[in-house]
Amino acid sequence: MKLAFLINGNARKYTELQQQLQAAFRDQQTSFFISQSAGHLTQLATEAITQGFDHIVICGGDGTLNEGINGIVQAFKLNDNGGTADYDWQKIAQIKVGVLPFGSGNDFSKTVHITKEISYLKNLIENGRSQMVDIGWVSFINTKEQPATRFYMNITDVGMGGETALKLQHKIGVLGPDINYFWAITSSLATYKNVHIEATGDDFHYEGKVINFVVANGRFFGNGLGIAPEASVTDGKFDIVIIGDITLMDYFKNLGKVKRSEKLIHPKVQYHRLQKVSIQAKEDRSITIDMDGEFIGHAPMTLECLAQRICLIC
């Protein structure tokens, strides 16, 4: 076993975390890869694969996990046709991927019940505990207005979630994750206007205004909001949550239920389960995309759930 730790270099106290990991895994063959900027961790993950590491632990929040997963998958790219068949999924499945939630938003880890305790992670690795989990694939328009594709582990959504992620690009580091998320959400609510979209899938069609259209692999987003209470990372399907043309008053009235990860009973809220869905705007307005807590670009977009492609240490 060759064990690599990929650490978000922007995380507070990351050097202390590295020291703790070195002490805990001193009997293992380990190496540390520390990111220096946004997107760097994707490159580091690919480098770790190239160097023969077969256990890769990604230390950070959901955005860091997203970067690491994309780097792992990219290391096994066979073709450049722009589809899910471009990758060697058999070899990807041989890489055991761990998560150490050490970021500002750690929502995916809540779904799979992974803690930030290093002793817990060590026990999982030493006992060979792992499970094959689903991964999401998305084609979209990136921030450079070019067609692009990307993978995700937790949640991708359009609507207010995308606007919130865009605002979080300008978060204030000294405030901490809870205050930053609260500021981003409330400031988005103050100016956001529900967007008119059309979404299609197998035997599925939706057209109308939404405050959020959520395509969930995991259950939580927005730093602990249980938006998709019944989502599973092993069923090969996305949980679709459509929060339609509701008022801000309705939004706040139901926020408590979302925090408790309860399904909402409301005439303009829908739940569906799909393997694939496409989303486009039905008005002359840019629709921002939130993927795992990060702004990545704009619709139109197509999302596909790939069943049990990642070997997760859990």
Image: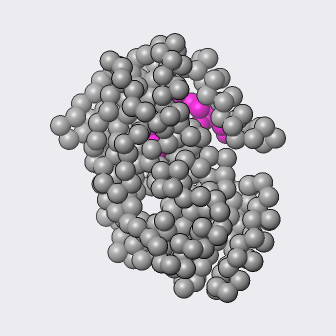
Task: Tell me the quarter of the picture where residue 24 sits.
Answer: bottom right
Q: From what the image shows, is residue 191 above or below residue 183?
A: above
* Residue under the image location 47 percent in, 56 percent down: 112
* Rendered image coloring scheme: one colour
Percent x, y for residue 13? 79, 58
157 part of magenta stretch: yes
| Percent of width and height locating residue 65 | 56, 57
- Residue 70, compared with residue 52, is above or below; it is above
Q: Residue at x 53, y 33 (%)?
A: 259
**Residue 180 location, x and y as percent?**
70, 35
- Residue 296 in view here: no
Tell me if 57 is positioned left or right of 156 in this view: right
Residue occupying image coordinates x 60% and y 17%: 191
Q: Quadrant of the N terminus?
A: bottom right
Q: Residue 122 magenta-drawn?
A: no
- The residue lying toward the viewer, choosing from 271 and 38, is 271
Position of 261 with respect to 238 (left or right) is: right
Q: Between residue 262 and residue 79, name the one nearer to us.
A: 262
Identified at 71% across, 72% down, the residue is 21
**Which quadrant would residue 3 be assigned to in this image?**
bottom right
Q: Magenta residues?
A: 155-169
Above or below, comparing residue 154 to residue 277 in the picture: below
Name the residue furthest left. 203
Asked if residue 188 is positioned above or below residue 90 in the image, the reply reads above
Q: How many marks?
A: 0
Residue 76 position within the rendered picture, expressed as x and y whole percent measured from the top left = 44, 72
Predominant SS along the magenta part: helix
Q: Is residue 274 visible?
A: yes
